């Protein structure tokens, strides 16, 4: 078959589909939202790593014992016939996602998604070992040397150790974690335990260390369909174009009105801190995970310029257009009421569960 030379249009399509990855070096950011993110990471990771070690009434408090077909959760025991509760829990989780997304946008992505949380932890380790953004960029550009090899090897060793601990903890939710620890120390792990520890460790190392924003941009289905849950009253992180444009650099002492400039000094700090590498000034984009790093970065710039904060802020499309905002609207009310009813039903069903003891005599 004859190959025709690709037209620029073909090339554009190809670039959009198979764009070469450009490594992102998110700049560290401080401000109002950064501590909340750090707190979220500590709380969520803390819960994940600590819960399997907690005992309740002499047993591991949370243990999904698959061979015995029993799930232990703080004294409650769920059997295969209780699958109904799991189904209900999944429906509640899905509906919560709809409810909170309609109300407050991508809260899940920015603050609670495991991909975000573990990536934050891996980025933190990277910064501690390789230094801040400029140092990381300089190191990557430099030719391989003993120093570069040492730094890179240290980073990957630390990442792998952390990922290994993550994999071990994951299996500890399914096999009593203390026994698992003893088996690991004696090198007598079973084949399935070995497989899942290795699998989960490499999944963590790969996703949080290497793939990072690629998971959010190309692999996560939620990013693609979340816009269907948004409306003009949904809380989003947005750049105030009316206030910021025309953008342009200037001295702090310059009168921006005289120069015909808006409040954006075009410093690109909001882009440099973005973990997915986008420019929020281009409008709402599906790649935005709602982490609020650009808000902190821009507020810092506004403070330094002596301009009011909030050029990038949590807002709604209606507010940006000067229209009233409706928090309570049919969509949020319906989601909220169904969610409350399901939650109430689940709590009632579990609280009034009557265990049945059967003795079968042959
Ligand atoms: S951080 Fe603020 S001032 Fe700087 S480029 Fe971004 S929007 Fe403009
Ligand atoms: S645009 Fe802002 S809120 Fe969105 S991912 Fe980037 S830094 Fe986070």
Image (cartoon, rainbow, N blue to C red):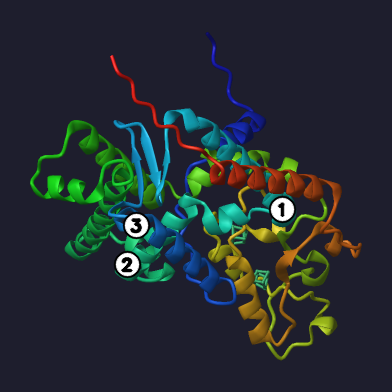
Label 3 sits on residue: 49
* Of the two numbered discs 3 and 2 in the rendering, the one whose residue sits closer to the viewer: 3
Callout 1 environment at 10 Å: few (<14), some (14 to 19), or many (20+)?
A: some
Q: Secondary structure at mark 3?
A: helix
* Rendered location of residue 45, percent (x, y): 40, 59
Residue assigned mark 1: 284
Assign the C terminus to one quadrant of the image: top left
As measured in the structure, the alpha-carbon distance from the residue carrying label 3 to the one carrying label 1 is 35 Å
Q: Is residue 18 shown to the viewer in this render?
A: no
Front one among 261 and 343:
343
Dot 3, how many residues are within 10 Å of its Cα: few (below 14), some (14-19), or many (20+)?
A: some
Q: Disc 3 or 2, which lies upstream in sequence?
A: 3
Q: Which residue is mark 2?
A: 130
- Residue 356 shown left or right of residue 264 in the figure: left
Q: Quadrant of ligand 1?
A: bottom right
User: Which residue of the protein is positioned furthest toward the bottom in this rendering?
Assistant: 253
Mark sitting earlier along the chain (1/2): 2
Q: Residue at x 37, y 68 (%)?
A: 127
């Amino acid at each position: 078959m004859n190959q025709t030379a690709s037209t620029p249009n073909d090339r554009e399509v190809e670039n959009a589909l198979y764009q070469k990855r450009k490594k992102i070096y998110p700049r560290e950011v401080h401000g109002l939202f950064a501590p909340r993110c750090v707190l979220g990471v500590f709380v969520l990771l803390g819960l994940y790593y600590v819960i399997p070690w907690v005992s309740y009434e002499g047993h591991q408090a949370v243990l999904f014992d698959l061979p015995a077909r029993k799930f232990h959760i703080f004294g409650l025991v769920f059997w295969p016939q209780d699958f109904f509760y799991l189904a209900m829990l999944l429906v509640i989780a899905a509906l919560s996602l709809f409810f909170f997304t309609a109300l407050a946008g991508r809260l899940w992505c920015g603050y609670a998604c495991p991909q975000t949380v573990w990536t934050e932890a891996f980025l933190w380790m990277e910064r501690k070992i390789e230094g801040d953004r400029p140092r990381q960029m300089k190191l990557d550009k430099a030719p391989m040397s003993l120093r570069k090899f040492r730094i890179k090897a240290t980073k990957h060793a630390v990442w792998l150790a952390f990922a290994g601990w993550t994999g071990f903890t994951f299996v500890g939710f399914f096999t009593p974690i203390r026994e698992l620890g003893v088996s690991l120390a004696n090198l007598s792990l079973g084949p399935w335990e070995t497989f899942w520890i290795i699998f989960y460790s490499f999944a963590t190392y790969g996703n949080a260390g290497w793939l990072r924003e690629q998971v959010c941009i190309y692999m996560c289905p939620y990013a693609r369909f979340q816009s269907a849950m948004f409306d003009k009253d949904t809380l989003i992180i947005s750049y105030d174009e009316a206030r910021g444009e025309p953008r342009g650099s200037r001295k702090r002492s310059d009168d921006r009105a005289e120069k015909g400039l808006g409040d954006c000094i075009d410093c690109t700090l909001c882009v440099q801190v973005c973990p997915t590498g986008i420019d929020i000034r281009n409008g709402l984009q599906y790649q935005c995970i709602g982490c609020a790093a650009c808000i902190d970065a821009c507020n810092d710039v506004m403070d330094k310029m002596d301009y009011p904060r909030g050029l990038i802020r949590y807002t709604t499309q209606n507010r940006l257009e000067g229209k009233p905002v409706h928090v309570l609207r049919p969509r949020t009310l319906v989601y909220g009421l169904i969610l409350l009813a399901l939650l109430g039903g689940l709590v009632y069903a579990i609280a009034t569960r009557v265990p049945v003891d059967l003795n079968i005599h042959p």
